[in-house]
Image: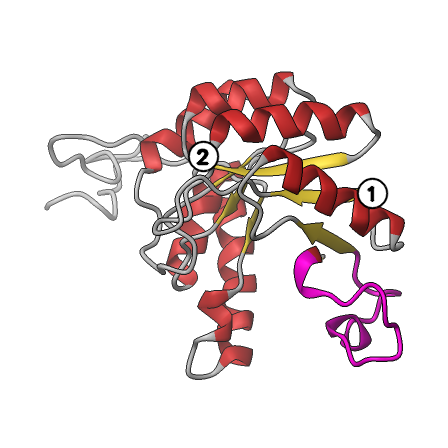
Amino acid sequence: MVTVAVRRVNLTDRGRESLLDYIDRERFALLPNTAGCYTAEDAVRAARLGREAGLSEWVKLEVIGDEKTLYPDTAALVEATKLLVGEGFVVLPYTNDDVVVAKKLEAAGAAAVMPLGAPIGSGLGIQNPGNLALIREAISVPMIVDAGVGTASDAAVAMELGADGVLMNTAIAEARDPVKMAEAMKLAVESGRLAFEAGRMPRRRYASASSPPLDPGGVVGAGARR
């Protein structure tokens, strides 16, 4: 899936070069997004334009509340989600890592909730893993970590916390070798998901021998001291 900012795509003059010319829509689904919108009204309008232009009825919903941090306006986000769901859109809202807001978005009809790991384009990694774990427990729709991933280990952490996917751009686009970084991200997402499904061993305060001193046959265990 490739997300495309509706406001950055020329929807009127199809003769001009466009990002859409380079996306094989037989292989990739488009996810229009409302990047650059600062009110619920603007975001809803952008989503409608994308659908009318034939992009998709899916939308990555962004309603920015602060220009410096690009944190979302969560009240406007919930409002826009309700409106768009009522119009038949499949809404995937970009939000902060707040469990209460995540639950409100699910109640509003969001098809997934997309909390940030860190501010957009920051590359800081997962700043509040505890919050993401709480969101995973609180909602039943998919959780997709959106924003803040800087390298493959960040993606793995997100998946180990129970994310169903990771949306990324800058971490790959600004890497010294974007192709290698994209491959690393793919592997990290796969390994992180496997680790989540496998279940992490419990954390312990003190050491614990990895095998008992003697097995039933009287042989010294590999992890025990002789």
Task: Report x, y in % for residue 58.
Answer: 77, 43
Residue at 39% across / 64% down in the picture? 151
Residue located at (55% from left, 29% from top):
76
In the rendered view, does 9 fall on the left or right side of 192? Answer: right
Q: Quadrant of residue 209?
A: top left
Span colored in magenta: 7-29
The picture quadrant where one finds residue 204 is: top left
7 above or below 160? below
Is residue 133 visible in the rendered structure shown here? Answer: yes
- Disc 2 on helix, strand or loop? loop
Q: Is residue 17 left or right of residue 208?
A: right
Towards the viewer: 15 or 128 = 15
Residue at point 83% right, 65% down? 27
Of residues 5 and 136, the one drawn nearer to the viewer in this rendering: 5
Comparing 116 with 40, the one in front is 40
Q: Is residue 136 visible?
A: no
Q: Which residue is mark 2?
A: 199
Dot 2 amino acid type: Gly
- Determine crowd level at label 2: few under 14, some 14-19, many 20+ residues with C-alpha closer than 10 A: few
Q: Image check: 37 left or right of 212?
A: right
Where residue 153 sits, quadrant-wise, is: bottom left
Q: Is residue 10 above or below residue 125?
A: below
Q: Which mark is residue 57?
A: 1
- Report the Cα–Cα distance between label 2 and label 1: 36 Å
Q: Is residue 57 above or below residue 150?
A: above
Question: Secondary structure beneath disc 1?
Answer: loop
Q: Is residue 25 magenta?
A: yes
